[in-house]
Image: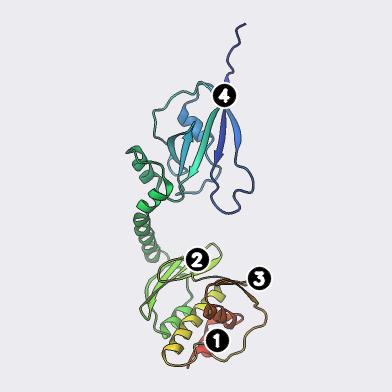
């Protein structure tokens, strides 16, 4: 007996998680589309619900990398478009972080494998150059600055030389060390030299006081004094050490990676930038 084919077919969709906590709930789902829907339209229809500009995804359809998708540019097919006639169709979106989607499409269209780690390594120098250009634009066009005037003056008092200061990032040198301060959501992050952050702090004013204290400690040590002054430490900030990491609990957030940084955090708690200058000056 003849049975007419269903007028729709299933898309079985899933995606990578993008961060810790994003995998608590499954991303797998099923959508129905009319039979004959174009592949490009089907990919757009089931695209990730995370609509973050600058994020790239590779749509793998029935095991084959079929397209690069981004909220900025939509679907860029890596295969010829076609009408979908049979289902179910398996669609998995692989997360390629903040690799530029146009650059990513160009590489994959040339035949490179969709190896995220290898492509991230290729793209890293371009990303750094673009990020720095964006910071320079923000520094030039926006009035806001990450650090307060009081903090900047205090750091200069200790010999810091500023090379960039925008609303979301600041760079300076001190005693041949390159320092970078960034706003990361609500966190005040500090980097010194290469690698990851040496401190993640909150609130912002506390982060500024800590930063002044770190330079003050360096100057004291260079001049032959004890790096840390003999000053009252607030009992309200309790730090816990686990391996080489010191952390806090409560509204004041501390994540640091040295005993000196932890001690400076305890001195900075409850003090302003100007008060830290008074405490650390010799």
Cα separation between marks 1 and 3: 24 Å
Q: Position of residue 147 (x, y in %)?
A: 47, 73
Residue at x-position 50% and y-position 30%: 42
As drawn, the label of residue 98 is none
Give whichever of 253, 196 is nearer the camera: 196
One can see residue 75 in this view:
no
Colour scheme shown = rainbow
Q: Name the residue: 37% across, 65% down.
A: 140
Q: Between disc 2 and disc 3, whose residue precedes?
A: 2
Distance in Å between CA atoms under marks 2 and 1? 23 Å
Q: Secondary structure at mark 4?
A: strand
Image spot of residue 262 (x, y percent): 56, 78
SS of the residue under disc 3: loop
Q: Which residue is mark 4?
A: 9
Circle nearer the N terminus (1, 4): 4
Answer with mark 4 or mark 2, whichever residue precedes in sequence: 4
- Secondary structure of the residue carrying tag 2 is strand
Is 207 on the left-hand or right-hand side of 79? right
What distance separates the C-alpha of mark 2 from that of mark 3?
A: 20 Å
Task: Determine whether label 2 and label 3 are within 8 Å by CB.
Answer: no
Query: Which of the labelled discs sits on residue 249, or is there none?
Result: 3
- Name the residue beneath numbered marker 2: 183
Task: Judge depth for marks 2 and 3 and give the one in front.
Answer: 3
- Mark 1 = which residue? 275
Q: Is residue 92 left or right of residue 242?
A: left
- Residue at image position (39%, 31%) is 79
- Mark 4 or mark 2, whichever is nearer to me: 4
């Amino acid at each position: 007996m003849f049975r007419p084919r269903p007028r729709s077919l299933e898309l079985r969709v899933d995606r990578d998680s993008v961060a810790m906590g994003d995998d608590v709930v499954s991303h797998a789902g099923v959508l129905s589309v009319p039979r004959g829907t174009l592949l490009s339209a089907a990919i757009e229809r089931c695209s990730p619900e995370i609509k973050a500009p600058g994020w790239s995804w590779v749509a793998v359809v029935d095991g084959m990398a079929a397209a690069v998708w981004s909220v900025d540019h939509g679907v860029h097919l890596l295969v010829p478009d076609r009408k979908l006639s049979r289902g179910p169709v398996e669609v998995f979106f692989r997360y390629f972080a903040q690799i530029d989607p146009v650059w990513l499409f160009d590489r994959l269209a040339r035949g490179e494998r969709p190896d995220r780690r290898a492509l991230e390594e290729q793209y890293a120098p371009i990303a750094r150059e673009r990020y720095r250009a964006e910071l320079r634009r923000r520094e030039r066009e926006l009035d806001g600055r990450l650090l307060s005037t009081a903090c900047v003056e205090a750091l200069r008092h200790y010999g810091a030389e500023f090379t960039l200061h925008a609303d979301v990032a600041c760079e300076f040198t001190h005693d041949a060390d390159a320092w970078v301060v960034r706003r990361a959501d609500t966190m005040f992050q500090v980097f010194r030299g290469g690698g990851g952050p040496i401190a993640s702090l909150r609130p912002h004013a506390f982060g500024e006081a800590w930063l002044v204290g770190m330079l003050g400690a360096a100057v004291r040590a260079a001049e032959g004094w004890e790096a840390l002054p003999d000053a009252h430490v607030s009992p309200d900030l309790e730090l816990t050490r686990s391996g080489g990491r010191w952390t806090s609990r409560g509204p004041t957030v501390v994540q640091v990676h040295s005993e000196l940084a932890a001690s400076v955090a305890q001195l900075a708690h409850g003090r302003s930038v100007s008060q830290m200058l008074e405490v650390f000056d010799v």
